[in-house]
Amino acid sequence: MKKLFSSFIDRIRSISEWLHETKIIRRIGITYQVFWNLFLIFLIFGLMSVFFAGGAAAGYFASLVADEPLRSESDMLADIYNYEETSEIYFADNTYLGKVPTEFEREEVDLENISDHVVHALIATEDEHFFEHDGVVPKAIMRAVLQEVANSSVQTGGSTLTQQLIKQQILSSEVSFDRKATEILLAMRLEHFMDKQEILEAYLNVVPFGRNASGRQIGGVQAAAQGIFGVDASELNIPQSAFIAGLPQSPFAYTPFNNDGSVKESFDAGINRMKSVLRNMHDNGYISEDEYNEALEYDVREHLTDRTPSPLEKYPYLTDDIMRRSVDILMKAAMEEDEVVLSEIEDPDERQEVRDQYIQKAAMDLRRKGYVIHSTIDKDLYDGMQEALMNNSHLFGNDRSDTDSSGNSYTEQEEIAFVLLDNSTGKILSFVGGRDEQNSTNNYNYATQAQRSTGSTMKPLLAYAPAMEVGVAQPGFVIPDTEDRYVSGGKPITNFDNRYKGLMTVRDSVAESRNVPAVRAFRATPSDVTKDIFDKLEFKHFEDALPESTALGPIDISVEKNVNAYATFANGGKHVSSYMIEKIETKDGEVIFEHEKDEVEVYSPQTSYLMLDMMRDVLRGGGGTARGIPNQLKFSADWAGKTGTSQFAKDYWFVATNPNVSLGVWIGYPSNAEKATLQSTGAGTYSQRTQAQWARMANAIYDIRPELIAPNERFQQPEGIVSRSVCTLTGTLASKACQDAGYVKSELFNSKFVPTKQDDSTAARFVTINGKNYKALDSTPKEFTDQGLSVSFDLWNIDNISSYLPENMKNIVPNQNAPSNGDSPGKVSGVSLGSSTLSWSKHGRNDIVGYRIYQASNGSDDFKKIADVKGNETTSYNVNGGSNAYYVIAVTTTGKQSSPSDIASGSDWISKEEQEQEEQEKQEEQERKEEEERKKQEEKEKKEEEKKKEEERKKEEQRKKEEEKKKEEERKKEEEQNQNDEDSDD
């Protein structure tokens, strides 16, 4: 009968569809539709009367539901109340954070907290006979059947609220007579198990209502009220109630929001639907005429709520981390309930598949089961730390550009992460997951997810503390910082400054972050001890023994794990696992998970305190690598911490703890490429910048929770700690010689490992050859020796310790005699004299303890010793060059000396013989000059005599001329006189 009736109905429907598709019928239009529908109604009623006659209808109905199992009350109620409900997240102290991000949001609400207007609007529109029927309304069903058969464009529906609830929660959305008959049966059955109020409440918590102002799908009236109008369901007014009640008929057509949360340009369809609901409310007497007219004037657009960022948008790092941890908790709980143990599944592929299945289920449950998740995060601290980071943007390094393995170029910015942890409980109080949380694109959390190389922050955890556990190290023990190599591979162990500092106590090595002592301490500790500590600290799992380099932090660890490990020291050696999820409850308040303190002893209280005491020095003056931090803090506290730099300076850390909390910071570039080296900027070196970030973050925390980060109490010294005076050269009890030399220091010890042996140092003369100290021989000239302290360094197999000693330890002498070759050395070569420096070449012998300098003054062959130069490496001496001469003699450890070197002299110096010869030459020259002068004088006198004679001759000639002239004048005068006489006679 079922098959016959279904076939008949399908035939009638196909005829109807064919007629609607023909052009002839389309031209007939509405008039024909009326006649056609009337015809179908009469036809259907006629057929129904035939089929239902004589119980046929009952038989047909029974055939439709024959395969439907009889559902118990508990099964049906479980299905009805099994609806998706959005889980909620809370900060610490029950401060609301938001809903777990999901495509579908729902929040359960009791009927008493739903506005009566909503109930009235729903009943008036969806099921006006709700309080009268027993789950179905036959008349409505007949109407719906006729509309279905006739393929009517107007579908008024024939389902009551009870039927809609059954359809939503128990049955599929399939359209068939079988499903419809099952729906009717179950609806009538449900009415026996639930009263009308319970059905209404369930319906209003189930039905979908389109989208909210964030663009997410919503179900249930509470999510609709909050997501559309920003009020609770109890506060909805008449027009708001009418608008929401009209949505379920076509949620996405009527919703005012687009899928991105923006308001539609027009949502007239939803407004018109609201008006229809208001008309139904008025017609059914739920609202008055005035209320109806007033509601029609209500501006829905004006009262829509603003877009509210989801927790994933506002707190992406935090929300994502809480969700990941919650999924992990739910996964483990489900496995435990199902008695599934992954480690027992041998096939790795199968093991991974099983794990993935449980993860998927847990993730789905988190989004659908309305859990209430309580976290440990302090909202004020979290917000304050993010703000503080934004205020410190000038402390970041420059962006860097590079190409990846595929040749694609990229640019990345320096990243940063912080974790603040409560020591005693392991609570993660706050963190900074990255540089710019609001603009994070992938929510990759550098505080809890990223695994980065930890550098020297591992030295206290995996080198010194394990060594102190077995007595290999104590703060006052000496572990030299000298040249050494890794046992595996023979690679040199170097320090960040490429230097070695020689004899150092463990305390100084921690403060100054020296690498060689850390590796030596690690090497001297039994591997099973270190491996056990490594595992208890919840670091990565290693099947084999840890390599020596582990002491220097090449392993990758998250900031959370590193900070959590340092809190172990503050807890007296007990490791308390970090956590962020305090508890998870169901929507009904049932606690399905509550964190239980996970504590394991890693170090003894004595080791922990000694390690803390040494790490205090990291933040103190002198050589502490974080000594600049205290001056940047606005408060004081008993801090102990450690810096760390990874290979190639790709990561920098500072992790510190006080009696209350531990705070750690990391910086680095995301790519972790070999070239991604941290750089200096105008704000300082990468270490200075990071330490400034840490200090400013600590100050920001102090502004919010001063009592948390600045406790008045200090770390308490446990029993079993004693103070002893030790020789800082050996780490053993000081001898009188060590005391006299000034190398005694009071230091703390675990009473189990107090040194009982007195150091074997003694006063001794020593020489320095090739930069190395040796005990002087009895025959070694004292002028080439110094007074020192002879110490044995057999423990560390160091044969050249003196070459690594600082200036204040240059008088330390290994218990080793100076070398001796027996015979006299060859003479010193390369002697030369500058303006004020006498220089020579280093002698090639390995037993030369120094040189003697001899000087002779100008004109003398008597060379006298003027200086003894200690050490064979010194090859110059300051002198008054000029008129002196010098030679150099090398002296051996046995006192034998070389022959004089070649003489080096100034340009003015001459020997005695040269001086005598010079004086003789000067005398001969003087005599020669005097003879020449005599001859010149004689010649001069001769010339003067000749000149005088010439002058006399000339005078005589002049006289004669004058006489002749006078005679001539007289003769002429006489002649004139005679003439005159003659004339007078005439």
Image: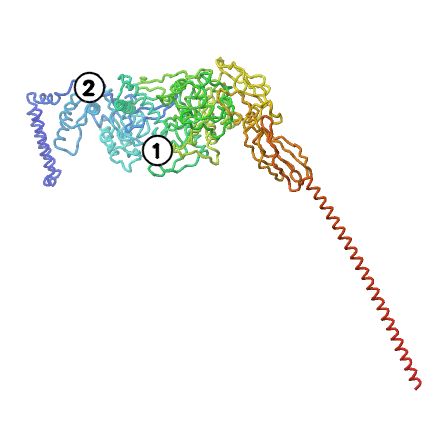
Closer to the camera in the image, 577 or 402: 402
Which label lies toward us, 2 or 1?
A: 1
**Which residue sits at x=14%, y=26%?**
139
Residue 30, percent from left and from top? 13, 38
Label 1 element class: loop
The residue that disc 2 covers is 191
Q: Are marks 2 and 1 in contact (CB under 8 Å)?
A: no
Q: Is residue 110 visible?
A: yes
Closer to the camera in the image, 926 or 969: 926
Residue 233, percent from left and from top? 30, 25
The residue that disc 1 covers is 441
- Give the mark nearest the N terminus, 2 or 1: 2
C-alpha separation, residue under disc 2 versus residue under disc 1: 50 Å
Q: Amino acid at mark 2?
A: Glu
Q: Is residue 114 visible?
A: no
Closer to the camera in the image, 361 or 612: 612
Residue 64, percent from left and from top? 12, 23
- Residue 72 left/right relative to 857: left
**Label 1 Cα crowd, 10 Å radius (few <14 / some 14-19 / many 20+):** few
- Can you tell which mark lies on residue 456? none
